[in-house]
Image: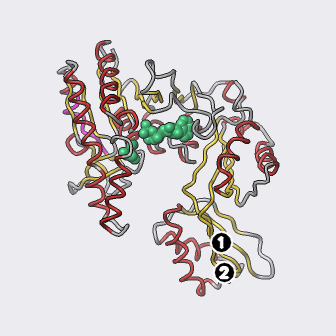
Amino acid sequence: MALIVQKYGGTSVGSVERIQNVARRIAKFKAQGDDVVVVVSAMSGETNRLVALADAVSGNNPNPREMDVVLATGEQVTIGLLAMALNSIGVPAKSYTGWQVSVKTNSAHTKARIDTIDDTAIHKDLKEGKVVIVAGFQGIDAEGNITTLGRGGSDTSAVALAAALKADECQIYTDVDGVYTTDPRVVPEARRLDKITFEEMLELASLGSKVLQIRSVEFAGKYRVRLRVLSSLEEDGGGGTLITFEEDEQMERVVVSGIAFDKNQARINVRGVPDKPGIAYQILGAVADANIEVDMIIQNVGAEGTTDFSFTVPRVDYKNALEILNQVKEHIGATEVSGDDTVVKVSIVGLGMRSHVGVASTMFRTLAEEGINIQMISTSEIKVSVLIAEKYTELATRVLHSAFGLDKV
Ligand code: ADP
Ligand code: ASP
Ligand code: MG
């Protein structure tokens, strides 16, 4: 007998049949004697629909507090429906919204972080033999406002619950049967990994693989939650992928384990700025003051007293960042501010990079052979990222996947 937290994503609860299917899977675990706590997302497409409604009535500028009031409704529907589906096959179940549990968060609307989870009611229900169903993606702040955790946030709700309940395992059921060497929708040759190290999963998630929200991986690391990604569409979950905290020789030997891409990128160039101390601060300080996150940064070696500066920002913040820099252009003494929001960051990730040389050069050669121009580069111990034109996303991912032998067992 185990305590298991299961999370079902939008596609997995996207129709009446799928919800009934989820109910049957949960019933099987119950019949086996396990205690089950379930976290669900909104039905697929629902959160996008709510975002579009909010944008439409607010001229694309929704009040963040009210945005969360609207966004949190999607998950309230699925928890209730799943509880009904379970009841109708004879499994006692009870649903909770985030604030009913309660899942306490900070007040950063639309991207709140979980602080604490009260597990009193959950334990009581489990003792009474009930399946407990909790709405993902949502919580409540200290003032009683509804909050949401950012897109993909149900993953984080599930892992945080698993940590709070000290569950034996957290199972993330989705529409693919595990973590692949890259997005299987982009590269059909992608292979499922039986296990992946926590560090690699953390990098892949932060570099754009949306199979797990980055925060959920961080939570799993912090509280050592046993985390597994599985398919809700296959009988046995399709094998799945275990996120492991142990490394073995095999893992060290594989140079590149996965490839991620992130289209939420835009590049900004500031040209002809005086090459003197404080210039990076003047440029990036102005951007940071507007709460815009900067990712890749390049400052060229100066020539004749001036230099060029390039960096990337989230695509949603592109226009705003351009505006800000155009305002401070004179003040910084720049000759030109320009940019491009049709770029993508493609990254290779692997623990084996620590002990192998020539990984980056293989990446650059492979892209060069396809005539793909690299605009920016950044590296860390276990990853190399390049910024390229968005139109090459599929091509670049595919050729890198094969160059690093990821299509071969
Ligand atoms: P859910 O609605 O269940 O949360 P998501 O759409 O958020 O599902 O995440 C699953 C999707 O992540 C897959 O359908 C797949 O297209 C995408 N994905 C991106 N990178 C990977 C990867 N490396 N392995 C598996 N899936 C990936
Ligand atoms: N429904 C939310 C979203 O679409 C949360 C989630 O699915 O994890 O982002
Ligand atoms: Mg998701």
Which of these two is toward me, 2 or 265? 265
Above or below, 327 against 176 in this view is: below
Q: Secondary structure at mark 1?
A: strand
Question: If the image is split into quadrants, where does the C terminus sit?
Answer: top right
Amino acid bearing label 2:
Glu
Picture quadrant where residue 274 is located: bottom right
**Residue at the extreme top:** 32
Q: Say whether residue 40 is left or right of residue 341.
A: left
- Residue 122 shown in magenta: yes
Which of these two is toward me, 338 or 287? 338
Which of these two is toward me, 139 or 67? 67
Indicate if the residue with disc 1 has its beta carbon within 8 Å of ligand 1.
Answer: no
- Residue at label 2? 336
- Residue 267 shown in magenta: no
Say whether residue 388 is visible. Answer: yes
Q: How far across and how far down the image is residue 197, in percent?
A: 58, 32
Amino acid bearing label 1:
Asn
Q: Does the residue at mark 1 contact the one at mark 2 (Cβ under 8 Å)?
A: yes
Q: How far across and how far down the image is residue 367, in percent?
A: 77, 49
User: Which range is magenta?
Assistant: 116-124
Residue at 27%, 44% (x, y): give it: 103
- Residue at label 1? 269
Q: Which mark is residue 174?
A: none
Indicate if the residue with disc 2 has its beta carbon within 8 Å of ligand 1.
Answer: no
Residue at 53%, 27% (x, y): give it: 241
Question: If the image is split into quadrants, where does the N terminus sit?
Answer: top left
Q: Secondary structure at mark 2?
A: strand
Residue at 62%, 70% (x, y): give it: 339
Above or below, 136 against 236 in this view is: below
Picture quadrant where residue 166 is located: top left
Q: How far across and how far down the image is residue 340, in percent?
A: 62, 67
Q: CA distance from mark 1 to mark 2?
A: 8 Å
